[in-house]
Every structure is written in structure tokens, then in C-alpha cells.
Image: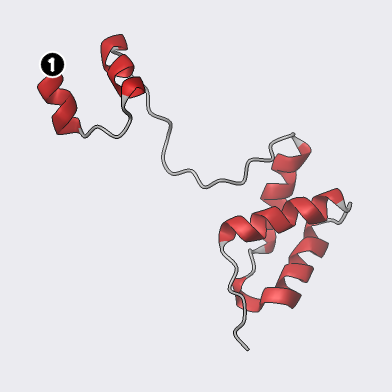
Amino acid sequence: MPSFEPNKHHLRELLIYFFNLKKSAAEAHRLLVEAYGEAALSERSCREWFQKFKNGEFDVEERSGRPKVYEDAELEALLNEDSCQTQKELALTF
């Protein structure tokens, strides 16, 4: 029988579940380790996520890097039209 390998998104959703059950971050970590072993999040990560939940932040999507900032309104308008354009395609527009 194949076993389920959780990804970080799945584990973060479980943390919301434990948070709503009024479990502590340490308890949530212990339950994750019991179920998933080494694939579980660290206790420190659990504490950090629980702090976010306490602050009302429940978005568990992965983000990388800082948000993009556009100084040129025309460029931003082009990106809003089609966000899949490459830099080269955008450069040809100007």
C-alpha cells in the first residue's frame, strides 16, 4: 500500500486545522511528526505559522522573493493585459 507524502502546502493547511482545534504549536508539531515523521515541518516553523494565524493571516501559499514593483504605469498596464509576456516581448512594445 503506497504511503502519502505531504508537501508544505498540505502541512500548512493541517496547521490551520490544529490551530482551529485550539492545539498549541508544540502539539501540532508532535502530531505532524507522529503522522509524517521526517516530512513534518520543524517546531519552529509551526510556531511561526501559528503566530501568523493569530495575526489573522491564513494564506498558506508559497511566495518567493519580494513583490514586484513597477514604476512605469504604461508597463504595468501592459502586464495587466497579459501577465505572461516575457521581458523581451515587453521590450519590443516600447
Number of labels in the image equals 1
Compared across the picture, whether 47 is left or right of 7 comes to right
Image quarter (top left, top right, bottom left or bottom right) of the C terminus: top left
Name the quarter where the N terminus is drawn.
bottom right
Q: Residue at x 88, y 53 (%)?
A: 21
Residue 84 percent coordinates (x, y): 29, 34
Q: Amino acid at mark 1?
A: Phe
Where residue 37 appears, x then y in whole percent?
A: 66, 78
Q: Is residue 74 above or below residue 69?
A: above
Does 31 sit left or right of 45 as displayed? right
Residues 41 and 82: in front is 82
Q: What is the x, y in percent for residue 4?
A: 61, 75
52 vs 88, left or right, is right
Q: Which residue is mark 1?
A: 94
Q: Position of residue 15 (x, y in %)?
A: 73, 55
Q: Identify whether 65 is placed above or below 43.
A: above
Residue located farthest toward the right when viewing the structure as drawn: 22
Residue lying furthest left in this view? 92
